[in-house]
Amino acid sequence: AQSVSQHNHHVILSEAASLELGCNYSYGGTVNLFWYVQYPGQHLQLLLKYFSGDPLVKGIKGFEAEFIKSKFSFNLRKPSVQWSDTAEYFCAVNRRTNAGKSTFGDGTTLTVKP
Amino acid sequence: DTEVTQTPKHLVMGMTNKKSLKCEQHMGHRAMYWYKQKAKKPPELMFVYSYEKLSINESVPSRFSPECPNSSLLNLHLHALQPEDSALYLCASSQPGRKYNEKLFFGSGTQLSVL
């Protein structure tokens, strides 16, 4: 079974600081990778995704993530965070052969101080 | 319309009650999901319907009974729940198939409290 690890449970940054949230997965086969975000009081929504091709993917609101296959990692980055980025961030993975079954990491709470 | 609509938003029920959660989407998605999310925890998959047929049941207790009346609707019938079942219940949908790679669209959820 696949599993997802997010190393940072709670990250606190000041505005304009750079962000990197770690995500590692354990599954040897071909996977689809996602980052979802849950802003306070809102529903989960897709931030970005990787299926194939360029391992550096760009998402909404200036976020990007890099898939490093050799490290089984899909870390999320943003060069300069804003107060409005305060949210819960979830990394998720599903197998190409069973894409209906997504596994989520435990989530990282990001707090950005103004 | 890119929304997944869930009703009710909040539900309080006793352990002997029977209630239902409803989910609706009009994006033409043929896969629909129920997830359970406890506070500060990731969503946990409960059920997956693909083309109106139950394709995944993650060993969910029988007090939770899903139903997919048509391609736009998904229900979760609740009966004899326990206090530990209190959680946010999320519905999601996606377009199955390799081309779409199962990107999930989530509803806002139903916050369920079992007394």
Image: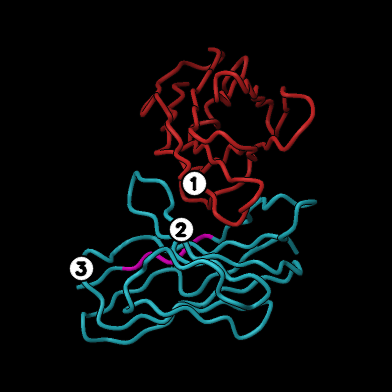
Residue B84 position in % (x across, y down): 22, 63
Q: Which residue is mark 2?
A: B45
Q: Are the residues flagged by discs 1 and 2 in contact, CB closer than 8 Å?
A: yes
Q: Which residue is mark 1?
A: A103
| Gap between marks 1 and 2 measured at Cα | 8 Å
Q: Earlier in the sequence, mark 2 or mark 3?
A: 2
The amino acid type of the residue labelled 2 equals: Leu
Who's the residue at 52% across and 27% down the image?
A: A83
Secondary structure character of the magenta stretch overall: strand
The amino acid type of the residue labelled 1 equals: Thr
Who's the residue at 60% across and 57% down the image?
A: A100
The amino acid type of the residue labelled 3 equals: Pro
Q: Nearer the viewer, mark 1 or mark 3?
A: 1
Is B42 in front, or is B47?
Answer: B47
Who's the residue at 64% across and 70% down the image?
A: B50
Segment colored magenta: B108-112
Say few, some or many: other residues with alpha carbon within 10 Å of mark 1 (under 14 / 14 to 19 / 20 or more).
Answer: many
Q: Secondary structure at mark 3?
A: helix
Residue A104 position in % (x across, y down): 47, 44
Q: Are the residues flagged by discs 2 and 3 in contact, CB closer than 8 Å?
A: no
| Gap between marks 1 and 3 measured at Cα | 25 Å
What is the chain identity of the residue bearing mark 1? Answer: A
| Gap between marks 2 and 3 measured at Cα | 19 Å
The figure's colour scheme reads by chain
Is B40 in front, or is A114?
Answer: B40
Q: What shade has chain B been given? A: cyan
Who's the residue at 72% across and 66% down the image?
A: B29
Q: Which chain is red?
A: A
What is the chain identity of the residue bearing mark 3? Answer: B
Residue B96 is left or right of residue A72, and the answer is: right
Q: Which residue is mark 3?
A: B83
